Amino acid sequence: MNADTTTASAQPDRAAEIDPAGMRVIWLLLTAAFVAILNETTMAIAIPELNRTLGIPPEQGQWLTSAFMLTMAVVIPTTGFLIQRFTTRQIFLAAITLFALGTAICLVSPGFLTLLTGRVVQAAGTGIMLPLLMTTIMNVVPARSRGRMMGRVGMVIALAPAIGPTLSGVVLDSLGWRWLFGIVLPIALVAMALGARWLTNLGVTTRAPIDVVSIALSALAFGGIVFGLSQLGGGHGAEATDGAAGAGTDAAPWLAVVAGVAFLGVFVWRQLVLQRRSAALLDLRVFRSRNYVIAVLIMAIVALSMFGTFSLLPQYLQNVVGLNATQSGLVLLPGSVLMGVLGPLMGRVYDARGPRTLLVPGTIMIAAAMFLYSTADLQTPVWVLVCTQIMMSLGLAGSFTPLFSASLGSLERTLYSHGSAALNTLQQVAGAAGTALLISVYSSSLHAGQAEGLSVAEAGAPGAQQAFFIAGCIAVVAVVLAFFVIKPEESDAPAPAAH
């Protein structure tokens, strides 16, 4: 009886353990995802410098970010199928190879077209990283420990975009734009070498035929929406002082969004038909889970607030407050460090207490930070902005982990990859929408003020206040929804065998 008791008591401990091979894969994916997202976010501050160095107009230079977002929007929806069709090793090596190749092309590019090509290749690899990471965690980490591991994912997603502007400012002010890629490339090559040497295959693969029509519809739908949104917001605020046209004056971005929504409707219809025989590119049965839907909606709002703020705040700090690129990045740094430190802790709290303990105060802090930003003016001390960003960082740290864990944990194991693909796709679209919304409001006010003879600082401050206030109002919706997210009942059914 004693032996039986000992065995029974030891069983939960073994269930909470993570296979060493699986843990090694997770750390490799975490590193690769961090580097890929860090690379993406360094470009926001670099665009003006690239425009000057390459001698290109602002609307052309903006394609270096628009093309990246567009490629991500096309690639991510396909990852649900890819992760099921190919092995972990194959997908990781393909993704990191694409990212490293794109980085190398950017590093040695002699002009704009080559640089743009490198950015597209980079994005193709980046778009695969996060869905693969999340799906791997759901498959190899026992349910009672998933919050802790998702805390590390939240740390990557939140920390990299915040460190990116700081790193970019320092590199641009001291070394030059090529070093943005020169620093990242060796890390990517090391990750590739480690993956080739140590990565094992996790899970099993399927032989479902790929639906080419769905891929085309996905590209037209999500690509059209993200392209339109990025053009509405991306090409104006960053070069406001150079007299770029006001946001929203061109009908082409709106036509792209409308066309994208139309293609999205056709894409959804086709997936509903194909999933009857389990052949969908993106299985929409994930949206049958109420908990998943609520968590994804909150994630979209959080992404809108985060990416919109990370796009607008550096411009506000440089154009209105008068800081340089390095100083603007440093405003984000204290909150970023705190968020990185708290990521794993938030995961442990989720495992012990569930999502609401973190998510309710987290979304409240995000909304409060938006409203505080909306009161900032020319006389607001920089330390107040730093403290406000710390508040927002705390809110993000408290939101990402429960959202990732509760959303994917609400699904059947066979739907993990599709749930991760849908989550990351909507996060990408929401991030583009947040950037477009905040930058468009800011730019419209800025150009109207300049037309009346106001300085950039005088004209830009009211626009930033309006943009942040609108973002705060949207963030309040996330606060309300946070009360309805529950911790799913997850079982520790064995994952598919590694091979």
Image (cartoon, rainbow, N blue to C red):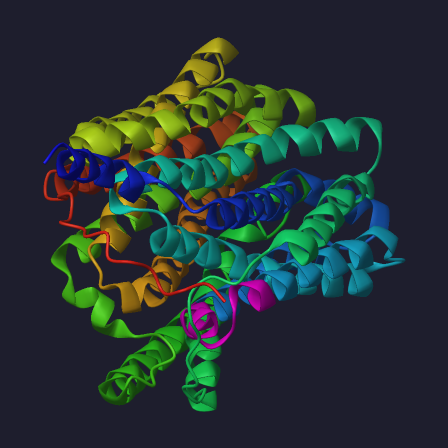
Occupied quadrant, residue 432: bottom left
Occupied quadrant, residue 263: bottom left
Q: Nearer the viewer, residue 14 or 400?
A: 14
Would residue 86 be counted in the magenta stretch? Answer: yes
Q: Which quarter of the image is occupied by the N terminus? A: top left
Residue 330 lies, with reference to residue 78, above or below; the image says above
Q: Nearer the viewer, residue 446 or 164?
A: 164
Q: Where residue 377 sits: x, y (%)?
A: 44, 19
Q: How many marks?
A: 0
Identity of the residue drawn at 68% across and 24% down: 326
Would residue 457 be counted in the magenta stretch? Answer: no
Residue 56 lies, with reference to residue 86, above or below; the image says above
Identity of the residue drawn at 36% across and 34% down: 468
Q: Nearer the viewer, residue 87 or 494?
A: 494
From the viewer's perspective, is 253 left or right of 179? left
Identity of the residue drawn at 34% across and 82% down: 280
Q: Which residues are magenta?
A: 77-91
Q: Where residue 347 sits: x, y (%)?
A: 32, 32
Q: Where residue 165 sits: x, y (%)?
A: 61, 33
Identity of the residue drawn at 30% across and 75% down: 283
Q: Where residue 443 sits: x, y (%)?
A: 50, 43
From the viewer's perspective, is 227 left or right of 367? right
Classified by dominant secondary structure, the portion drawn in magenta counts as helix
Whether residue 149 can be seen here? yes
Residue 497 lies, with reference to residue 234, above or below; the image says below
